Amino acid sequence: MLEPSLASIEFAATSSAEQPIARASAQLTAFVGRTLRGPLHQPIIVRSFADFQQHFGGLWQPSPLSYAVEHFFEQGGRQAVVVRVANGAMPVTLSLKCGRETLRLEAKAPGTREFLRASVDYDNIPSADQQTFNLVIQRVRSPGSERVEEQETFRGLSVDPQSPRFVSNVLIESDLMRVRGDVPLSRPDRTLMPGTNLPVGYVSSNPDGDDGKPVSDYDVIGSAARGAGLFALESVDDLAFVYIPPLARTVDVGVSTLLVAARFCRDKRAMLIVDPPSSWDSAAAAIRALKALDFRSDNALMFFPRISAMDRLRGRAEVFGNGGAVAGLLSRSGEAVAAALSEREPEPILRSSAKLAKDVSSSDRWLLASHGVNVLQSVRNPEREWPALRTLACGASASSDWSYLAQRRFSLFVINAIERGTRWCAGQPNGPRTWMRVTSQICNFLGELRSAGAFHAVPADQAFLVICDERINDSADGINILVQFAATHAGAYHSFMLTQRVGGATVRPVMVNRFEATLVVTRELEQEITLRITPKDDFVSMVALN
């Protein structure tokens, strides 16, 4: 096996990296879809269903996402990031009298459930100043309620366009409201308590919002240029899973969305959770439909069947997509490292809040697994053996490892941890000292994983390879790092090239010509070997030359 350069070896023997790479793996699950309220195209982290209620309004029958988030936390999920999308939703407005004119505000977030109110006063403003005012905006729980959920205070606003406190400009920073249309020449009237001349009263928002129509695949996909829809997650680090719930109660996510989402997850090094379509009413139907669907990805996974859970709004059990429950179950069952290194993978057992919508026999369980579909359980399996959890690679992956969920999650964890842990080097000189520090840091990290039980299919001296030296760093465009580590199957390796730049990092798979899988190149022989890098599409072929 090729070893690091001489400089890298010498440094690794005398020093350890100053910044150890963290072993904590990502457990963040992203949900993209329709909600009752909340900001559009803005990823917001929620740590409980109560958090979700505060930001997005809780359960809503037209929102499968709201039920999916509930299932996620019921099944043991810890952290979720939610992106709200909408189709034609309109914000409520609020009218502030300015003498004979009106200053119109509108909610930042569209929908009928934004219950906002505003108050105007002139406290601490000189009487000669007729253009300045103070504004308080509140979101309340319900119309007429005194329970304030959020409040913003803006002091010294002005209706003068030349003022640095011009109301239209300042409210750009508001999370609740912004100015709609032109600003009157006169400042808003002081708001008084109804029927009195006493401050402070409030003006409530108008009932003119609109929740919009059911969302489409187009709405969910969004726009990479605008950072909308699915692409609002571009700025989110540490994604473990992405889930797009059904578009409506009876409308599944389209194949176009699955293809875009799978590519997005590949680029973000996350896993896409795919619901079994509602028409799959048996294992045989699932297998027939899966062949027709022709959707394969080692960055996607699917569980069958759908789940039956209590709909608290309707007061009865309903059938739901299982993606939220699956994400919670996988988060609960352990991190990526533990799942990959354990002797026996945890069974995918649902908690009692959800049940299987269809029963699946033991033989069907194995048959579905052979096609890349996993099976949920509501009770422990009485059999001593059960299928390992699969991805939807279905034999189409470049690595046999990546047909298995635990191994694929582990490889993504390793790549993500190294990418995050070596970001410090992007601003460092691209020279031997930085290369040595990077190499030592990564070798220490991979060595710790080896000690924990990883890479056990090969001897210790063939477990991994790290190269960061002049052979792959012949330009000033970032620092290149070649990392290779042993796959589960003997003789197989995962290899990738990481480039750290000031503007961000890129990770791409590479193919390394090792002559023989078990070849170990000694330090003396390495001095006589150079590496030629030949870019080709998204891959790099590395050829050893005498």
Image (spheres, rainbow, N blue to C red):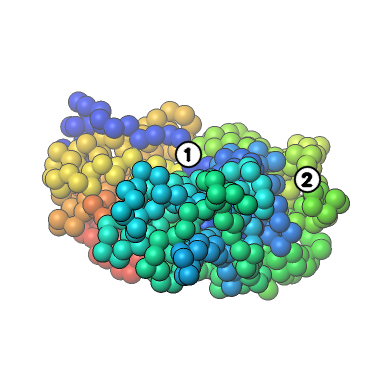
Left or right position of 326 against 469: right
Residue at 74%, 64% in the rendered image: 249
Which residue carries the number 2 mark?
A: 354
Residue at 62% across / 52% down in the picture?
A: 194
Q: Nearer the viewer, residue 298 or 105?
A: 105
Quarter of the picture containing the N terminus is top left
Q: How far across and down, in percent of the image, does residue 72 sit? A: 65, 45
Q: Mark yes or no: residue 98 visible.
A: yes
Q: Residue at x 58, y 44 (%)?
A: 149
Question: Which badge, 1 or 2, is on the more N-terminal residue?
Answer: 1
Check residue 393 in the rendering and tell me which mark sits there, or answer none: none
Q: Nearer the viewer, residue 424 or 460?
A: 424
Percent coordinates x, y for residue 36 in the rendering: 64, 58
Pointer 2 local density, CA inside 10 Å: few below 14, some 14–19, many at least 20: many
Q: Tell me the residue at 47%/70% (across/down).
A: 101
Tag 1: amino acid? Ser
Given the image, on which type of amino acid does mark 2 rest? Ala
Which residue is labeled 1 in the image?
A: 25
